Amino acid sequence: MFTALRLNQGRSRVLRQPIRCFAVDPEAPKRKQQKANKKKKKGTGGAEQDSMASKNMKMVMAALDAPMKIEPAISEEEKERRYHIGRNHVIGRFRQHNEIDHDLTCKIHLKQHAIRMLPRKSPLRDAALSINTTMPPPWRQLPVWTPPIPDFDPSQFVERVEEDD
């Protein structure tokens, strides 16, 4: 589609109007343009969709209306045992956090001291000040929300892929 500038009659402003250019042989016989065929759609499946929707709605309503399960009362010994397990876990994680924090603080102080000892404008100092963007090592411990489970081996739940030779 090309645009051409045309002047309006009696007006001085210029308007942009599209001009369509088609390569048509003027001597060729003219053909009647066919109308677009409109396909009639078969049943839209409204009844099937309604039945599926009502089935899903019934399932959701049954889940919402289901009675809540009431857990049995916990004995005093069990409450105390759980309390001590949680308390010991918190104390252990607190100590572990303090050890890691102390270790990182010592490393930062050592690094800052080593950088201060390097000559001012040297490649070693530039390399020491560059930021390392690699991922942390896989053995680094991550914070968790739950206490450790005794005799739990996570390697039992890792999927192994057997290679065919």
Image: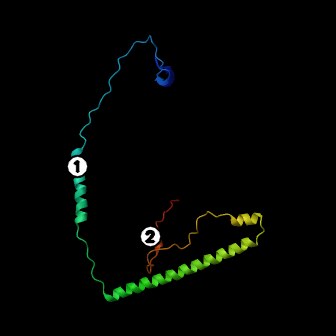
Q: Which mark is residue 50?
A: 1
Q: Residue at x 32, y 88 (%)?
A: 76
Q: Which mark is residue 157?
A: 2
Q: Residue 81 at x, y = what percent?
A: 38, 87
- Quadrant of residue 148 in the image? bottom left
- Quadrant of residue 98 in the image? bottom right
Compute the Cα span from label 1 to label 2.
42 Å
Mark 1 vs mark 2, foreground winner is 1
What's under tag 2, amino acid-wise?
Phe
Q: Which mark is residue 70?
A: none
What's under tag 1, amino acid-wise?
Asp
Q: Is residue 91 above or below residue 124?
A: below
- Left or right of 113, for residue 92: left
Label 2: how many residues lie within 10 Å, few (<14), some (14-19) or many (20+)? few
Q: Residue 154 at x, y = what percent?
A: 46, 73
Q: Is residue 59 above or below residue 14?
A: below
- Quadrant of residue 78 in the image? bottom left
- Left or right of 85, for residue 105: right
| Nearer-N-terminus badge (1/2) | 1
Q: Secondary structure at mark 2?
A: helix
